[in-house]
Amino acid sequence: MSVPCDILVIGGGPAGATAAALLAEAGHDVVLVEKSAHPRFHIGESLLPANLPLFERLGIAERIAAIGVRKPGAEFVSDAHRRSVAYPFAAGAARFDHSYQVPRAAFDTILFENAMRLGARGFQNLRVTAATFPKEPGRAEVTAVGAGGETRHFAPRFVLDASGRDTFLASRLRLKAADKHNNTAAIFGHFRNVARHHDGREGYISIHLVENGWFWFIPLPGGITSVGFVGNQSAFKARGGDIAAFFRAQIAGSPSVAARMADAETLGTVMAAGNYSYSARSACGEGYFLIGDAFAFLDPIFSSGVFLAMRGADAGAEVARAWLADPTTARRLARQAEARLNAALARLSWLIRRINTPALRDMFMAPQESFGMRAGLIALLAGDLDLPRFHLPVLAFKTSFHLLAALHPFGIRLQPDGSLRRAHGEKKEMVVF
């Protein structure tokens, strides 16, 4: 027999657990189904300051602070430019001056347990295998299979798909589309004895810009550092079957990365993930809404994954509440929520698609104050994606990029002092954006 409920949430990661917590707290009968069991390993350990208000709202702010490393900013490093540039959140227009680097196993467990505390019915080691939706508002039929092969059936009035990169509904409804402009893959692992900063940047995430990609360095508690390489097709073209050997070769190819990894000790195994960026053509349908990575996934260079997942969960919970009261109103809210999510994705995608271009790298390594561009960039790195006061800085940044990209074929590059110079070093003209 099918177990009735108001809302069924597929997936117990940050998106699913957040949505389940918000809905259960509002008094709805929520079932949260997770295919594995917490705690479990997951990548994506760097959070954004824009996460903090939702942590407070969920009542878990102190618990997150207790398990994490305080993150006051981000650092970009470039061997080609022979310099590093720090972007402290407190120095820009960000609403909050810090976030946290967290072990995802502990972080995700806190979110899942919090949903249970607030009244959601949680099931672990239970994988959703099928879902059918009525043409008119009513109850869906959802089938899930446990680790021992037992089958369970649920009859929710609404479904939130937070299945992550499994993209349960997007794949079955043929909504998923790969981002052909950002076809990347990643190799990553956890390490001890990675060189860390001791000059106020101890909690920073470090982004090392290298040929055909970039590295992340995320300091975690207990002397552990998460290190990963995200590369484009050119970077992986010559890869053989040994992932660890390929990772070591990429490390050796960057002087700044190799220096930090000189004494590193690998913990566990090095892992890989491909087809990094995708999105669904639509997030909403009759009786369902897609949130988090079940809707879209971006190259993680700006650490937006957990933030977008929790932001989507908040929007999805609002849609689900509305559906229970009035499906017509819910359809309108769903389209509006989808438009907001797509707008946020577009702002980040514009940068991500160009992160390997010389012009954008020059701009990151020589941030300019004119028109509020540096403050606006810091706000973006903090997760403040859609505040009106950043429209002018974003427009100025994009205009400057297009100018620099047009000048690059002529050997003219942006310098740290804001000037434009020919590649051979002759000063052509002083231009400060």
Image (spheres, rainbow, N blue to C red):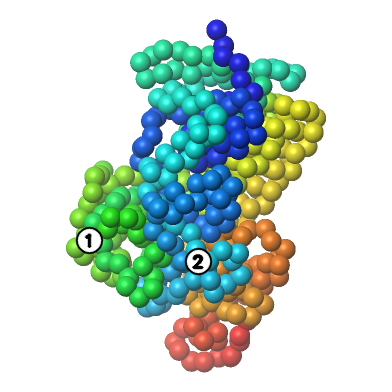
Point out residue 276 in the picture as x, y percentages from the top left corner: 46, 46
Q: Secondary structure at mark 2?
A: loop
Is residue 272 shown to the viewer in this render? Answer: yes
Q: Residue at x 42, y 39 (%)?
A: 109
Q: Quadrant of the C terminus?
A: bottom right
Q: How many numbered marks does the figure carry?
A: 2
| Pick the front one: 379 or 180 | 379
In the picture, residue 248 is in which quadrant? Answer: bottom left
Q: Secondary structure at mark 1?
A: loop
Residue of label 2:
357
Instruction: Determine crowd level at label 2: few under 14, some 14-19, many 20+ residues with C-alpha closer than 10 A.
Output: few
Instruction: Determine crowd level at label 1: few under 14, some 14-19, many 20+ residues with C-alpha closer than 10 A.
Output: some
| Pick the front one: 97 or 251 | 97
Q: Quadrant of the N terminus?
A: top right
Residue of label 1:
193
Point out residue 37 in the picture as x, y percentages from the top left corner: 38, 30
Residue 191 higher or lower than 318, as above or below: below
Is residue 162 shown to the viewer in this render? Answer: no
| Pick the front one: 303 or 2 | 2
Residue 267 higher or lower than 351, as above or below: above
Q: Residue at x 56, y 14 (%)?
A: 3
Q: Residue at x 44, y 87 (%)?
A: 424
Q: Nearer the viewer, mark 1 or mark 2?
A: 1
Residue 162 higher or lower than 304, as above or below: above
Point out residue 32 in the picture as x, y percentages from the top left corner: 52, 28
Q: What label sits on residue 231 in the rendered view?
A: none
Residue 11 higher or lower than 253, as above or below: above
